[in-house]
Image: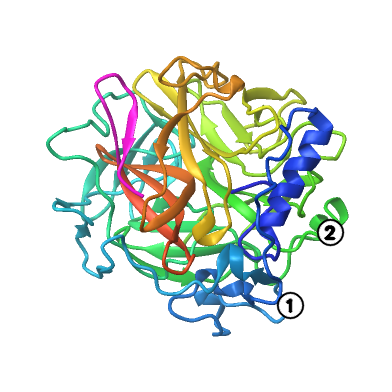
Amino acid sequence: MPGPIRNDVPAIRSHRCQQLRTAAVSLALLSAGACAEDPQPSKSDSVDAGSMGTTGSTTSPDPATHTAAADSSSLSATSMASVTSATAATGAASSTSSAAVSSSGQNTLTGTTGMGGATSSTGSDPTTTGAGGSNTTSTTDASTTATGGGGGSTSCEVGVHDPANPPATLTLSGNLGTHDPVMIEADGVWYEFQTGPRIYGKTSDDLLAWDGTPSALGAANPAWVADRVPGATDLWAPDISFFGGQYHLYYSASTFGSNTSCIGHATRPSLSSGSWSDQGPVVCSQDSDDFNAIDPNVIIDEAGTPWLAFGSFWDGIRAIELTPDGARASEDLHPLASRGGGAIEAPFIVRRCDYYYLFVSFDSCCQGADSTYNIRVGRSASVLGPYVDRDGEPMLDGGGTLLVSGDATWKGPGHNAVIFDGNAAYNVYHAYAASDGAATLRISELVWDAEGWPISGGP
């Protein structure tokens, strides 16, 4: 997700430029004219904020289809026109239970996985030792060893590139309106969380057919949001993980053109029962800081220590250490990547084989079919870096190998997450339909080549 911008608010494009300029004033690093060509979105052409999660409708009052409550904000048509029923790049949505792929091949999804660590499940929500590492999931139907997104695997046999079968994009159906998606699996159900009022969501039994769910945090924002981030309305860019015996939902609270922001934290022991218990903010930023506390992502290192990566624009991506219960462990801020005040955000770190991989999004989100978002990646032997791209360029100096960019059908793919299922890996992100600018859930196969660099299907 881009700086303090989300899919549910007006004037997103102008905000991105305003945010960029604000960051530049703080850092004196922005080149002149970076946003000179940016169009100004029309506030008069707006739709219900809740339509971000609808399928073929923008007006239904049912929160399970992500429609707007009476107090939800409107959304600029230039940034996110009506989110209608979206299909895969072929234009044909699949509602089958097999993993149909929008290419000349087929993909079969077997077993289950999550963003957790070592997981043992026997019909109830899993108990987990970490948000990363090796997951062992047992159900009454299958037994599968998997590695979780937000964590990873020391195995080099996960997501191996086969040149004869290049990675493809899954054909999805159902509720596909999405911004800033992240996913986790529990007991055979995939849970997706995304930007929206109190954090929207979806569920799927097969990664293919998706149903909307009510807002994760209920009918109102946690009380601390209004105190710490005045003016914040919708919550942005969540992250979901499982460690320390609980699920952890981190989310962003901010306003346009500002790095007065906080990352909130909620927990629950089960995704299939109960509700989220908000734990308050875990890290905040203010206008005197050179970072922006939004776009969280948890990674568990090989020693079992949880880290929270985050950042948007300003001086880039940072990380903080977390305690076993998900709170901030120290005041230290660790820099991971930067474009000197330019457009970089939405970090997502996974571990595979001998490396940690840092995925980020470059350039402009939220402009509908005019979006230029693209996904970049670098790697490091250490969770805190230094991360370099394939050419050896440090990500702290603007490096990042291009992974996914837009094409004639899908524009601005970005804000990705990575999930693992057995020996398969998938790249999860949103992209904008070129036909109408609708922000849409996309899931593509993700593999690594012989040199250990990821290749994604898409867009």
Who is closer to the viewer here, 283 or 145? Answer: 283
The type of residue carrying mark 2 is: Ala
Is any atom of residue 4 visible in this view? no
Does the magenta portion include 457? Answer: yes
Q: Residue at x 86, y 57 (%)?
A: 230
Q: Residue at x 77, y 46 (%)?
A: 261
Kindly indicate the quadrant of the structure image that contains residue 205.
bottom left
Q: What's the mark number on residue 205?
A: none
Distance, label 2 to label 1, CA atoms, is 15 Å
Report the mark closest to the observer, 2 or 1: 1
Who is closer to the viewer here, 411 or 305? Answer: 411
Tell me residue 34's x, y (percent). 68, 40
Q: Indicate how the structure is coloured in the image.
A: rainbow
Judge the density around disc 2: few (<14), some (14-19), many (≥20) Cα neighbours within 10 Å: few
Q: Which residues are magenta?
A: 446-459
Who is closer to the viewer here, 413 or 261? Answer: 413
Q: Residue furthest bottom?
A: 60
Is any atom of residue 263 visible in this view? yes
> Label 1, on which residue?
71
> Label 2, on which residue?
226
